[in-house]
Protein backbone atom coordinates (compact mmCIF):
# COMPACT_ATOMS: atom_id res chain seq x y z
CA UNK A 1 0.00 0.00 0.00
CA UNK A 2 2.81 2.44 0.89
CA UNK A 3 4.53 1.73 -2.43
CA UNK A 4 1.33 2.43 -4.38
CA UNK A 5 0.75 5.76 -2.61
CA UNK A 6 4.41 6.73 -3.12
CA UNK A 7 4.19 5.88 -6.83
CA UNK A 8 0.98 7.90 -7.16
CA UNK A 9 2.60 10.92 -5.46
CA UNK A 10 5.59 10.68 -7.79
CA UNK A 11 3.34 10.68 -10.87
CA UNK A 12 1.34 13.67 -9.60
CA UNK A 13 4.51 15.58 -8.65
CA UNK A 14 6.01 15.07 -12.11
CA UNK A 15 2.80 16.21 -13.80
CA UNK A 16 2.76 19.52 -11.93
CA UNK A 17 5.75 21.75 -11.18
CA UNK A 18 6.56 22.58 -7.56
CA UNK A 19 4.36 25.69 -7.59
CA UNK A 20 1.30 23.51 -8.15
CA UNK A 21 0.24 24.16 -11.74
CA UNK A 22 1.45 22.97 -15.10
CA UNK A 23 3.21 25.74 -17.01
CA UNK A 24 2.43 26.58 -20.59
CA UNK A 25 4.99 28.72 -22.34
CA UNK A 26 4.05 30.74 -25.44
CA UNK A 27 5.57 30.06 -28.88
CA UNK A 28 8.24 32.74 -28.32
CA UNK A 29 9.82 30.45 -25.71
CA UNK A 30 11.50 27.12 -26.29
CA UNK A 31 10.71 23.65 -25.00
CA UNK A 32 9.98 23.86 -21.26
CA UNK A 33 12.04 20.74 -20.61
CA UNK A 34 15.30 22.34 -21.80
CA UNK A 35 18.08 22.24 -19.21
CA UNK A 36 21.38 24.13 -19.44
CA UNK A 37 24.61 23.79 -17.52
CA UNK A 38 26.12 27.26 -17.09
CA UNK A 39 29.78 28.12 -16.52
CA UNK A 40 30.83 31.70 -15.75
CA UNK A 41 34.16 33.31 -16.58
CA UNK A 42 36.04 36.34 -15.22
CA UNK A 43 38.44 38.49 -17.27
CA UNK A 44 36.52 38.39 -20.51
CA UNK A 45 36.67 40.70 -23.54
CA UNK A 46 33.97 43.28 -24.23
CA UNK A 47 30.97 42.04 -26.24
CA UNK A 48 32.06 41.66 -29.86
CA UNK A 49 30.64 43.87 -32.61
CA UNK A 50 28.11 42.14 -34.85
CA UNK A 51 29.12 40.34 -38.03
CA UNK A 52 28.47 42.16 -41.32
CA UNK A 53 24.76 42.16 -42.17
CA UNK A 54 23.76 40.91 -38.70
CA UNK A 55 22.91 42.30 -35.26
CA UNK A 56 24.18 41.33 -31.82
CA UNK A 57 22.08 40.95 -28.68
CA UNK A 58 23.53 40.76 -25.16
CA UNK A 59 21.56 39.39 -22.18
CA UNK A 60 22.88 40.49 -18.76
CA UNK A 61 21.49 38.87 -15.61
CA UNK A 62 21.55 41.02 -12.48
CA UNK A 63 20.62 39.23 -9.26
CA UNK A 64 19.62 40.94 -6.01
CA UNK A 65 22.00 40.19 -3.15
CA UNK A 66 19.24 38.25 -1.35
CA UNK A 67 18.18 36.27 -4.43
CA UNK A 68 18.93 32.57 -4.53
CA UNK A 69 21.30 31.47 -7.31
CA UNK A 70 19.09 30.35 -10.19
CA UNK A 71 19.59 29.72 -13.88
CA UNK A 72 17.58 31.82 -16.31
CA UNK A 73 17.32 30.67 -19.89
CA UNK A 74 16.71 32.93 -22.89
CA UNK A 75 14.83 32.14 -26.09
CA UNK A 76 14.77 34.10 -29.33
CA UNK A 77 11.86 33.44 -31.66
CA UNK A 78 10.94 30.13 -30.03
CA UNK A 79 14.39 28.58 -29.55
CA UNK A 80 16.55 28.67 -26.42
CA UNK A 81 19.82 30.44 -27.29
CA UNK A 82 21.56 30.44 -23.92
CA UNK A 83 21.37 30.83 -20.17
CA UNK A 84 22.83 32.85 -17.31
CA UNK A 85 23.41 32.16 -13.63
CA UNK A 86 24.10 34.93 -11.17
CA UNK A 87 25.54 38.23 -12.35
CA UNK A 88 26.59 37.13 -15.82
CA UNK A 89 25.94 37.77 -19.49
CA UNK A 90 26.03 36.06 -22.86
CA UNK A 91 25.68 37.32 -26.40
CA UNK A 92 24.07 36.03 -29.56
CA UNK A 93 24.06 36.98 -33.24
CA UNK A 94 20.83 37.41 -35.17
CA UNK A 95 19.47 38.57 -38.51
CA UNK A 96 17.82 41.98 -38.86
CA UNK A 97 14.06 42.09 -38.31
CA UNK A 98 11.49 41.61 -35.56
CA UNK A 99 12.45 39.24 -32.75
CA UNK A 100 10.56 37.82 -29.77
CA UNK A 101 12.49 37.33 -26.52
CA UNK A 102 11.41 34.99 -23.71
CA UNK A 103 13.21 34.61 -20.39
CA UNK A 104 12.21 31.92 -17.91
CA UNK A 105 13.49 30.01 -14.88
CA UNK A 106 15.24 26.84 -15.88
CA UNK A 107 13.55 24.63 -13.29
CA UNK A 108 10.47 25.27 -11.17
CA UNK A 109 11.03 25.41 -7.43
CA UNK A 110 8.60 26.21 -4.65
CA UNK A 111 10.08 29.68 -4.09
CA UNK A 112 10.07 30.79 -7.74
CA UNK A 113 7.16 32.72 -9.13
CA UNK A 114 5.96 31.26 -12.40
CA UNK A 115 6.49 34.44 -14.37
CA UNK A 116 8.35 34.29 -17.66
CA UNK A 117 9.26 37.71 -19.06
CA UNK A 118 8.91 38.87 -22.67
CA UNK A 119 10.09 41.59 -25.05
CA UNK A 120 9.68 42.22 -28.77
CA UNK A 121 12.23 44.32 -30.64
CA UNK A 122 13.32 45.07 -34.19
CA UNK A 123 17.02 44.52 -34.85
CA UNK A 124 19.01 46.46 -37.43
CA UNK A 125 22.18 45.17 -39.08
CA UNK A 126 25.36 46.46 -37.42
CA UNK A 127 23.72 47.30 -34.08
CA UNK A 128 24.07 45.75 -30.64
CA UNK A 129 21.07 45.45 -28.32
CA UNK A 130 21.25 44.95 -24.55
CA UNK A 131 18.64 43.40 -22.26
CA UNK A 132 18.79 43.13 -18.48
CA UNK A 133 17.31 40.09 -16.77
CA UNK A 134 16.56 41.12 -13.19
CA UNK A 135 16.31 38.35 -10.60
CA UNK A 136 14.86 39.67 -7.37
CA UNK A 137 13.30 38.59 -4.12
CA UNK A 138 10.08 39.80 -2.56
CA UNK A 139 9.58 39.06 1.14
CA UNK A 140 6.45 37.43 2.49
CA UNK A 141 5.33 40.05 5.02
CA UNK A 142 3.36 37.43 6.96
CA UNK A 143 6.42 35.31 7.68
CA UNK A 144 7.22 34.69 11.34
CA UNK A 145 10.98 34.39 10.79
CA UNK A 146 12.09 36.07 7.57
CA UNK A 147 14.49 34.07 5.39
CA UNK A 148 15.08 33.84 1.66
CA UNK A 149 12.60 30.96 1.63
CA UNK A 150 9.79 33.14 3.05
CA UNK A 151 9.12 35.04 -0.13
CA UNK A 152 9.00 34.85 -3.90
CA UNK A 153 11.77 35.11 -6.43
CA UNK A 154 10.82 37.53 -9.21
CA UNK A 155 11.98 37.83 -12.81
CA UNK A 156 11.86 40.80 -15.19
CA UNK A 157 13.33 41.68 -18.57
CA UNK A 158 14.01 45.16 -19.94
CA UNK A 159 15.93 46.75 -22.78
CA UNK A 160 18.69 49.18 -21.77
CA UNK A 161 20.72 51.63 -23.82
CA UNK A 162 24.08 50.61 -25.29
CA UNK A 163 26.18 52.51 -22.73
CA UNK A 164 24.42 50.99 -19.72
CA UNK A 165 24.37 47.52 -21.29
CA UNK A 166 28.08 47.64 -22.13
CA UNK A 167 28.91 48.76 -18.57
CA UNK A 168 26.76 46.04 -16.98
CA UNK A 169 28.35 43.37 -19.19
CA UNK A 170 31.85 44.58 -18.28
CA UNK A 171 31.08 44.45 -14.56
CA UNK A 172 29.64 40.91 -14.84
CA UNK A 173 31.09 37.52 -15.65
CA UNK A 174 30.54 36.07 -19.10
CA UNK A 175 28.57 32.84 -19.24
CA UNK A 176 28.74 29.79 -21.44
CA UNK A 177 25.69 27.54 -21.48
CA UNK A 178 25.68 23.94 -22.64
CA UNK A 179 22.32 22.35 -23.30
CA UNK A 180 22.00 19.08 -21.35
CA UNK A 181 18.43 18.16 -22.24
Image (tube, rainbow, N blue to C red):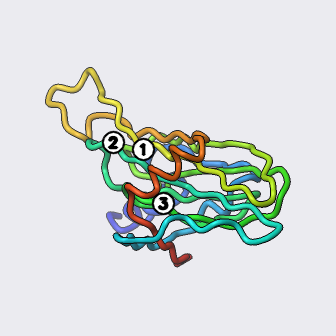
- The secondary element bearing badge 3 is classed as strand
Counting residues from the start of the chain, the first of labels 3 and 2 encountered is 2
- The secondary element bearing badge 1 is classed as strand
Which residue reaches farthest left?
145
Q: Which mark is residue 135?
A: 1
Question: Rounded to the nearest whole Å, what is the CA distance between mark 2 and mark 1?
Answer: 6 Å
Question: Rounded to the nearest whole Å, what is the CA distance between mark 3 and mark 1?
Answer: 13 Å
Determine which quarter of the picture holds residue 127. bottom right
Q: Cβ–Cβ below 8 Å for labels 2 and 1?
A: yes
Q: Which mark is residue 89?
A: 3
Location of residue 12 with respect to 133 vertically, above or below: below
For this rendering, which residue is in front, 172 or 107?
Answer: 172
Q: In which quadrant is the N terminus drawn?
A: bottom left
Drawn side of residue 38 relative to residue 93, left or right: left
Q: Which residue is drawn at 66% across and 63% down?
A: 31
Q: Position of residue 14 (x, y in %)?
A: 50, 60
Q: Cβ–Cβ below 8 Å for labels 3 and 1?
A: no
Drawn side of residue 49 relative to residue 20, left or right: right
Q: Which mark is residue 64?
A: 2
Q: Can residue 160 be seen in this view?
A: yes
Q: In which quadrant is the C terminus drawn?
A: bottom right
Q: Where is residue 93 in the image (x, y as percent from the top left)?
A: 70, 67
Mark 3 vs mark 2: in front: 3
Amino acid sequence: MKLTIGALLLVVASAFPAHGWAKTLPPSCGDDGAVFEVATHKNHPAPAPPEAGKARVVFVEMADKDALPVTTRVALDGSWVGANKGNSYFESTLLPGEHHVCVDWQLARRYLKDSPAFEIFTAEAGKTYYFVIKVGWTANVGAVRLTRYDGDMTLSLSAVNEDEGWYLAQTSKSSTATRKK
